[in-house]
Image (spheres, coloured by chain):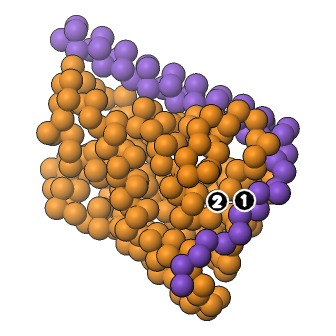
Amino acid sequence: MVGGALCGFLEPFGDLLGATFYPLNTPLLVFEAFGRQIPLYVFVGESMFFASAVYIAYRFLRSGMPTRKLLAIIVAFSVFDAAMEMTCIHFHVMTYYGNNPLLVLGLPLYAIVQNGALAVVGGWTVLVLEPKLRGRRAWWLAPVVPVSFGLQAFVATWPMYLGLNSDFSRPTMLALGLISTALNLALPMLCIYSPQATAARRSAPAQIDLGERLPYVS
Amino acid sequence: MFHHPRVPTEMVANQTASLIFLAFTAMSFLGVLTWATSIFCVHRTSFHSS
């Protein structure tokens, strides 16, 4: 949850690159960077969203869940995030602006995929780093969450960030948006079929208890 | 080549919707916090009893 809240500090970067805006009269604006004001609900919402998404995906990966269940996590969190953001856009709580041909009810297609994929990408990052960060060092997993999400967005959504901040034509923007969508789909697939996740699937029974004791909690 | 699109600074937030969304995120946050705390307590109990 700490890691999720830290993601709020990345929001101004994402808003600037991804052409997202929270109106200046939004109640409880609590952070400003690069001229972007970030409301309290971004920190609270991202803490809740990242904590549940990354933790559940991590437990599924570690428990050796089959690929279809990991894909179901991506779909579930994509739908949950899309429902929240589309509702916010509809009721003028926030907006995506600029020459964006991939808006679905105001929300870009690549963002829908990206925000579901972050569960598996973040969960995989924790899966890989958790054996090295046990005991008190487990607190270092908190900043791992925003770093993982930042790198995911930088790598997979970069083509569209470039397009949104350039003078490209609408067909070029459409192509860049579709490339970003495809990259945001490919990245979690790489995680699912990584040696670490494959090894977990081979060694662990496909059962999960979300309340099971974690190896790094002492 | 590079230029940022015009930011719609004139946009006015629906204050009621913003507060409702803040309340929704706060309730969800408390739900996840309760879940995380219960997992942590179960872990501590099982760890110390074993």
Pinpoint residue B7: horizontal percent, then vertical percent: 71, 63
Q: Is residue A116 above or below residue A93?
A: below
**Do we see residue A150 in this rendering?**
yes
What's the residue at 59%, 42% (across, down)? A32
Residue A20: which numbered mark, if any?
Answer: 2
Dividing the image into 4 quarters, which one contains the N terminus of chain A?
Answer: top left
What is the C-alpha distance between the residues marked 1 and 2?
Answer: 6 Å
Local SS, label 2: strand
x%, y% of residue A39? 66, 40
To which chain does the residue with label 2 belong? A
Compare residues B36 and A179 and report the one nearer the observer.
A179
- Left or right for B15, reference A155: right
**Residue A5: image location, x then y, percent:** 48, 36
- Labels 1 & 2 near each other (Cβ < 8 A): yes
Q: Colour of chain A?
A: orange
Secondary element type, mark 1: strand
Q: Which chain is purple?
A: B
Left/right placement of residue A192 relative to residue A11 reads left
